[in-house]
Image (cartoon, coloured by chain):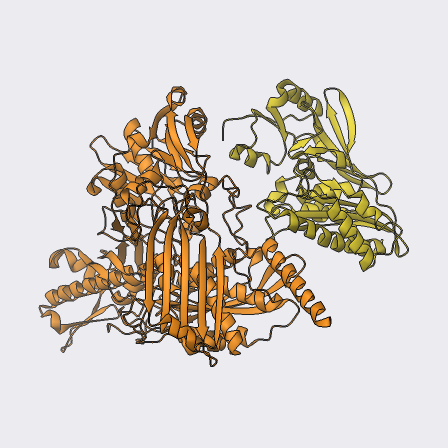
Amino acid sequence: MAASTTTGDFKVIGTRPIRPDGVDKVTGRAKFGADYAFPGMLHGKVLRSPHAHAIIKSIKIDKALKLPGVKAIVTSKDLPDAENMLEQSGELTVNPMHLSMNILAHDKVLYDGHAIAAVAATSPHIAEEALRLIEVEYEVLPPVMTVEAATKPGAPILLKDLRNNEEGDKPTNVAQHYQFKRGDVAAGFKAADYVVEREFNTAMVHQGYIEPHNAVGIYNSDGQATIYCSTQGAFDVRSLSAHVLGMPVGKIKVVPAEIGGGFGGKTTIYLEPLSVLLSKKTGAPVKLVMSRAEVLRASGPTPGAKIKVKMGATRDGKLVAAEIWMAYQAGAFPGSPVAAGALCIIAPYTVENFQIDAYDVVVNRPKTASYRAPGTTQAAFASETVIDELAEKCGIDPIDFRIKNAVKEGAPQIMGPPFKRIGFIQTCEAIKNSAHYKSKLTGKFRGRGVASGFWFNAGMQSSAMVNIHTDGTASVVTGSPDIGGSRASMAMIAAEVLGLPVTDVRPITADTDSIGHTDVTAGSRVTFATGMAVYEAAKDAVRQLIERAAKVWEKKPDEVEFRDGILHAKGDGVPPISIKQLAPRFPRTGGPITGRASVNARGVGPGFATTVVDVEVDPDTGKVQILRCTIAQDAGKAIHPSYVEGQMQGGTAQGIGWALNEEYFYDDKGTLRNTGFLDYRIPTCLDLPMIETIIVEEPNPGHPLGVRGVGEVSIVPPVAAVANAIYRAVGVRMTQTPMSPPKLLKAILKHRGATTTQHSAAAD
Amino acid sequence: MHAINYDAPTTLDQAVSILKTHGENARPFCGGTDIIIQLRAGVRRTEHLVDVKKIKELQVLSFDAKKGLRLGAAVPCIEISESDVMRRHYPGLTEAAHLIGSLQIQNRASVGGNLCNGSPAADTTPALIVLGARARIVGPNGEREVPVEAFVVSPGRTVLKPGELLVELLVPAPAPHSSDAYLRFIPRNEMDIAVVGVGAAVTLDGDKVKAARIALAAVGPTPILASKAADAIIGMKLDDAALEAAGRAASAACSPIDDMRGTAEFRLHITAVLTRRVLSIAAERAKKN
């Protein structure tokens, strides 16, 4: 099989086989984190802060320890000191000290729901009763909930040791200021015929994965620990837990369970070290499972943001300048994705003059974690709304306006290096030519909006093994937890290379002792990077198969050819043999065949998407119905088109939820009020139409199969697309999320008032 | 959630006796769609749950053209929403029962439980109020009847005293040329809780309103019977001006709060909008009766 081609005619890739994990999932046999149970297992519960910001004066656990059935209680005193430094872990930059402070509050609680102590008991009920008996004395401090509150002079300081890159030794809530610029912004605006400047505010939102966080920890008396948990990155759980527990990485094994959704939220740790600590104290396996309220209060949502965008265009629709200020709520500890947001906010367009200032700000909210194209949906809401407005001022169709300014191969990225082959314009054209965009939208209070999005995608490290079984079938072993159907893709890539039917290839996700290091399932990297490792490992297996056949035939390896699963001897009339026929000869030709590959994948191909959405607004209530939605996304090469479409639809659905109703609702004391899915409103199936998908395949030259990551960029355009559609429906520009009925109605009434006043003024 | 004792009496006497014995520490429960969640969240605490689903008086659903409706307190919502008789005679109450939760929830949840939970946002309570429903209660000191509009006294609290139990709801037979309707506003299209709910029952005399009742949910500490809103249309033709007047009067009857489900300002506006809409629907239906 030829490498580096995507036009080759594939037998498996591009087809839509049934997912290998499907049967277990639909029959309920799949084992998720909370399904694990062991003899003598104890149940853990976590005591959490009722205050958003307070000093912990004392914690008394005596009464709780005396409750029959309670076996152990841990507080931050049981954690070793962790280093105040920055370390790269997968796609995250991690400060072990902050991580430790998030696992169990040290001297301060920094958000409603911040963990303070954990109890292990013989039943979950007893553990919960014990929580009520732990006495914590607090000195309550004023909560700092917004970027404005955190940055105003005299604001209460969350972290006394926090310093940034600009203010010397001054205590601050601003963790970092990033700046990216090019050209001459003032000159750019001078050349502009139209300038639009707006300020946007987005609410903190959660990924909304259905499966809560969970962990079972088993600490053995020989100092070895095992953690079973639902995670996007077993190797990250291992290294992060090692930091918090002060254990060597090699003493911890992490077994990734089936995962009920992650979307970036399961790339860090919460319960894992607690399960090990409690197991160490009790000598028994300890299981912890969060409630939904705990997930919302204390796992990692994505930041609320304040973004100011000023952009200018010439009369003929060329973008000439952008000035952007953005500040993201990092949560209680530094590390919001504001830099990613800054690098993506105008990434789809060639803008010769820009300056982007981005601030990472700590507030009394849970420490944010990744969420699908982290930091970019907020950013695109702002920039894509302004672009829509500029297109309108120029009198150009919003898709044409985007095409006119679109980056293409060779254009410099925000950081400077040029784009390689990309498919942004193709996604715009796909939408422009779609039945949806060509259809006429009629009816009152209806509007159509479009928006586009960019996401880098990630490469990073992956390992893979391809084992050829004694019957000539194969298994594919990777270290990538499957959050989006990736096992199907891994099996398909191996099947393609080996010339086997996909049903002859079993894919599994291995634990941290059973496969080489593999970075987290994030950054849309699995099908790209782990797929690259699988491709190489399968190639390695093929190379070995050729050697064995050569041995059997007493020929040189270069006299053997492998085509479509069959080994052929060049030249004379030796009958070709299949892998199945060769397999029984493995023992006498050198033993089992295992293809191996480990990669640090370069050649990442960025992802682009363009989305069109039709809405209908009830002008008397502010309620928005999504009538129709179509997304076009560049997949490079869709290995399993159904799962690519699933990613496109899933990200779109989440983006629409973000646009319309989702928000963290804190009261004035900094207490989260909507701690369940009743009042944290993700869309239900009655809130969404069938989301139509158009897969664009502009091959990524950096991948042997042309693959680009596809898991994230779909969430970037919808918020802006909905806002732009609402504008066309009722004439108001929404600059905050969620565009929920109370907020939209208020804007509509204000607009109506303004229009009425204008009319009466004109009449006067 | 902490460990809880559970009883499932099969007679009213047994139920009252168990409830009396445990007093404040016991709560009747039916579908559990509210109380289980409240116990889990720690917003209510009880030591004893008394399951009332096995008591036959609480499972009665019968309609008589003269006497009206007897609706047992434990009848699941799904029996109402799937009943042709209910849909014909009490379409508003039927649509309110059909709005609660999902189909799965409607198999568990009851109109009686919805009332006893005491939420100001209960969908079926305004629908009952506009029909003039009465709650029949039994307890250690015998029986009493309370009009539904007086049943809820504050958020989560009702007139039920320790040991007392709601047995059934008694709804008068609909008058000729009358009908009812219920609308609620939710941000999503299902699986939600009313931000505002408005029920209306209208009796027509020709094209004029002869009698009307309007009740509101989620716009005050309890469900509200908005008598002045009804007064605004009695004797009137239901034209735009009358609907506007009723809407304004309904808003004036509210005392909403700002919360995560909506601002007070929003609720006042929506109350007027829904009042106009629900009156139009009820009147359309009444014309056909």
Which chain is orange in the rendering? A
Screen quadrant of the N terminus of chain A: bottom left
Task: Name the image quarter holding residue B226.
Answer: top right
Task: Name the image quarter holding residue B218.
Answer: top right
Q: Residue A433's x, y, as percent? A: 49, 78
Q: Which residue, as the protein is rendered here, is positioned at the far bottom?
A: A316
Q: Is residue B261 visible to the viewer in this orientation of the structure?
A: yes
Screen quadrant of the C terminus of chain A: bottom right
Q: Residue B146's x, y, as percent? A: 78, 31
**Which residue is nearer to you in this view: A247 or A642?**
A247
Q: Is residue A587 above or below residue A294?
A: below
Q: Residue B77's x, y, as percent? A: 67, 43
Which chain is yellow in the rendering? B
Q: Is residue A94 left or right of residue A554?
A: right
Q: Residue A730's x, y, as percent? A: 62, 66
Q: Is residue B83 visible to the viewer in this orientation of the structure?
A: no
**Which residue is nearer to you in this view: A418 or A523?**
A418
Q: Is residue A130 left or right of residue A525?
A: right
Q: Is residue B178 left or right of residue A130?
A: right
**Which residue is nearer to you in this view: A321 or B256?**
A321
Residue located 25% across and 57% down the image: A462
Residue located 84% across and 42% down the image: B173
**Which residue is nearer to you in this view: B45 or A722?**
A722
Q: Is residue A409 above or below residue A627?
A: below
Q: How many marks?
A: 0
